[in-house]
Image (tube, helix red, strand yellow):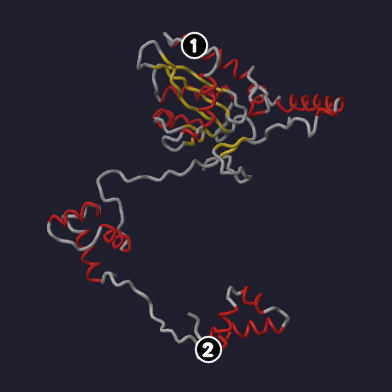
Amino acid sequence: MTDLAARKTILALVDIAVDSGARQEQACAVISMSVRTLQRWRKETDGDQRPGRVQQPRNRLDDVARQRILAVANSAEFGHLPPSQIVPRLADQGSFIGSESTFYRVLREANQVRHRSASRPAVERSKPRALSATQPNELYSWDITYLPTTIRGVHFYLYLFLDIYSRKIVGWQVYDEERSDFAAEVISDICAREKVRPGQVVLHSDNGSPMKGASMLATLQRLGVVPSLSRPAVSNDNPFSESVFKTLKYRSDYPERAFEHVSDARQWVSGFVDWYNNEHRHSAIRFVTPAQRHAGLDEEILRRRHVVYTEAKARHPYRWSKETRNWTPVTVVYLNPAKEPNRDCQRRAA
């Protein structure tokens, strides 16, 4: 309800607008009021005569009932139980002081809705921080995948490290165990071979035990490599490693039979890595090879392709209804971006 003083102010403002040339309907629309309300206000010179009472539900609990519910919920007998367990137990004792929803409502208003059991409470996991790379050796991704052996239930493990910007496999090894110190050996070799400086590279991975093991974390700290972790059990947070593993296992020459010895697995993976880095034209980087992009040769290759297409269009313009194919180099690669990549995407994990 609007009091009399506020009504008079609004009526005066509408009158000023109308005197200035505005239509009454438009003036009312600006303040979200109907013309009929305005007309009624002009007739009711004494203001709104309706009683200004506040509605309250008839079944509203009084303070005594609320305090009783809180006392029961925090008692030694029921303090460790949720309302869904308290209410039936009270009924077994021949007592009813409130429904389950009433218990929850009273506890919520008292800021006492907490995890009450001995189990670990649920932890909300936020999406990993968005990262980006504008040149090689800035952002790596790594993971471990199984390779089958001739013994059921026993596997070899492929440790594979990928440069996200160039898509080059910068390091790999096959072992017969998942161990943090094995991963530490591979990343140490990569940093020495790629001449990685402290603070230069962010290394993203999932939450597996080798990724979070003491040996691996200590090695990363010594090398100055910044770790970045996915959410538990969310493979989409580490898409680049998952993608290269799918490429590996869907290769036409992937062995139909399991590997008998770890040396057999290493030999096959060595051939795959050579093909992937030096022959495979990767669709996400304008169909140049990862090795070419890692070495900075992709810009010249794409420039020459653009010239070829431009000359072809000049010779046969009727074959193109639009511009020629886009051979512009991909300058930024994002890892776990927001819905739309933006310039504020951080390149370094804090």
* Helix, strand or loop for disc 2: loop
Disc 2 crowd rating (10 Å Cα; few below 14, some 14-19, many 20+) is: few
Q: Residue most toward the right?
A: 315
- According to the picture, the residue beneath numbered tag 1 turns out to be 255
Q: Where is 155 relative to 129, above or below?
A: above
Q: For residue 60, which quarter of the picture? A: bottom left
Nearest the viewer among 203 and 336 is 336
The amino acid marked with disc number 1 is Pro
- Residue at 12% of width from left, 57% of height from top? 93
Residue 70 visible in the picture? no
* Helix, strand or loop for disc 1: loop
Q: Where is 236 relative to 7, above or below?
A: above
Contact, CB < 8 Å: mark 2 with mark 1?
A: no
The amino acid marked with disc number 2 is Glu
Between discs 2 and 1, the one toward the N terminus: 2
Residue 142: percent from left, percent from top: 50, 28
- According to the picture, the residue beneath numbered tag 2 turns out to be 44
Nearest the viewer among 39 and 299 is 39
The residues tagged by marks 2 and 1 sit, at their Cα atoms, a distance apart of: 91 Å
Q: For residue 326, which quarter of the picture? A: top right
Residue 269 visible in the picture? yes
